[in-house]
Image: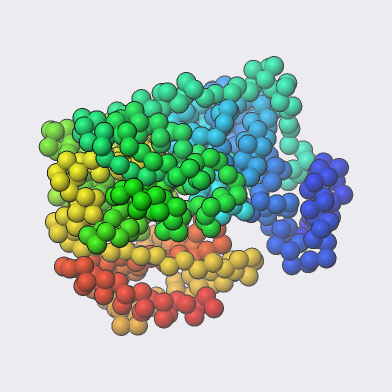
Amino acid sequence: MSYKETYNYWLNNPYFDDETKKELIAISGNEKEIEDRFYKVLEFGTGGMRGLIGAGTNRINKYIIRKAAQGLANTIAKQPGEKEKGIAIAYDSRRFSREFALESALVFAANGIKAYLFDSLRPTPELSFAVRFLGCAAGVVITASHNPKEYNGFKAYGSDGGQLPPSESDKVIQEVNAISDIASIPFMEEKEAKEKGLLELIGQKIDDAYMEALKKVSVNPEICREIGKTAKLVYTPLHGSGSVPVLRILDEIGFEQVTVVKEQKDPDPEFSTVKYPNPEDRSAFELAMDIAAREDVDLIIGTDPDADRAGVVIRNEKGEYVILTGNQIGCLLLEYILSQKQKLNDLPGNAFAATTIVSSDLAERICRHYGVELVTVLTGFKFIGEQIRLLDDSGKKKFMFGFEESYGYLAGTHARDKDAVVASMLIAEVYAWYKSRGMTLYDGLVELFNKYGYYKEDIDTFTLTGKEGAEKIQEALETLREKKPHSFGKSRVAAIRDYLIGIRRDLEAGDTEPLNLPKSNVLYFEMKSGSWFCIRPSGTEPKIKIYYGVSGNTDDSAREELHGLKQDVLSVIKPLLD
């Protein structure tokens, strides 16, 4: 059907409720809006789906959620013995998150698959833990992570508690795409599902087990108990699901002087005190910084709505509050975990850490110093979770820590996705450790750079909405792929990694070699200076992202190198996006 025929189908089919039809009638005179809502079906990608909330096939609503749930149910039904294990479901504080979680549960119930639904909002990493704890066949989280309030989504997890890797998500995608008529999806009433034992609410038991698992990850618990009595910090959950678990774990490991930002403590789907509920964004910490300044606090921790990402603000040598990058946080945690485990003779000979191709090269330097293997994967924490399954679960290697530049971290194997709750605990612990040495976290960062070199990274993001925007993003990547530019301004290219075709090409020698990673629409440019940049479309938003990485012997030289690289790259790429 054409987009207009699909629009009329939704308007006239009695399956769709009055609220949906009312919303569609309101846009009846806006042809562009109708096209955008119906020109395609919101795609179920490698991690699930995410989109604007609203009526239409290219939006997140209960009907599209039902379709995603049915696709997952069909996949599980084809795997012998899996259907009986059930599916765990969690949700965050976003609009319709609870409703979409229940919709999913009742589709699973109608397919004879038991749904374990959390009784209130929980962090995404706790869902990952719950899948493993309950021995479920799969898991679902209703969340759009740190996206703006207009978004929501459906994230699917495998039996190991990790986001589905491409080999598994492809099966779900096929099942979702095979559903041609949304109105045919089976659905069970909540009362009937409970009576038949196909819907069970879960909560406290999982919470307690999750907390115990987190405490086992602590490296120096005695320092937390000692320094935590007086060490002050500020925490904000940014209106999301982190409030209860983060405050609980900080209390249980010994931090007695934690101030929570009251205005941001309670769940709020409007995220009314922030423009964007993202702990990468300094503006999200404005209230927290006001409190920290009044109370003379050196550390602020913030978590995003589903508490899988954590941001950190510290005071520098001038007493100014500065937000750390995801790379800086990740490398501080990596250095702390490896150095302390080595000191305690608890660093295995087969230890490994994991990060992504767009994260800091500093991670490799740290791992090399401690004789630890660093596994590098594509962007997306699901690939780090997959490495834990392949290497740690098999007994080949022991997982120490994983991080990505976009503020995602995981220590321990209790979960297989980034965990802002365990990260908050460890950030507080590192803070206490430096404090026990008479240092601040800023001093620790300077110490890290003095030891390994000054590494700097940055990212540029361009938003291009609608069908035209998606086409322009694709055209820009195809142009770069076809031309294989040898330079960007004054910056010369040494090699290009094209992850879509799986080839690294040395531009000077002309040699090629395979990239042993899954296919992905990503171009990575190695520069002759030793710096790099990488360009890729976002998997969850109408955006294209450019990542940069440089290093230098001093902070100033690294900053100058980064500035020059960005200018050179944007001089070529920005015209492709205009």
Percent of width and height locating residue 100: 65, 39
Q: Residue furthest bottom?
A: 490
Q: Is residue 97 left or right of residue 30?
A: left
Percent of width and height locating residue 364: 23, 53
Percent of width and height locating residue 6: 79, 55
Q: Is residue 361 left or right of residue 64?
A: left
Q: Is residue 290 left or right of residue 551?
A: right
Quadrant for residue 74, please give it. Answer: top right
Which residue is more in the foreground, 314 or 106? 314
Q: For the point 31% across and 34% down, which residue is it?
A: 255
Establish if 363 lies above or below 216: below
Please state, as top left, top right, bottom left or bottom right, where the C terminus lies in the image: bottom right
Q: How many marks?
A: 0
Tell me, yes or no, if residue 306 can be seen here: no
Q: For the point 36% across and 38% down, which residue is it?
A: 258
Q: For the point 58% across and 44% down, which residue is it?
A: 268
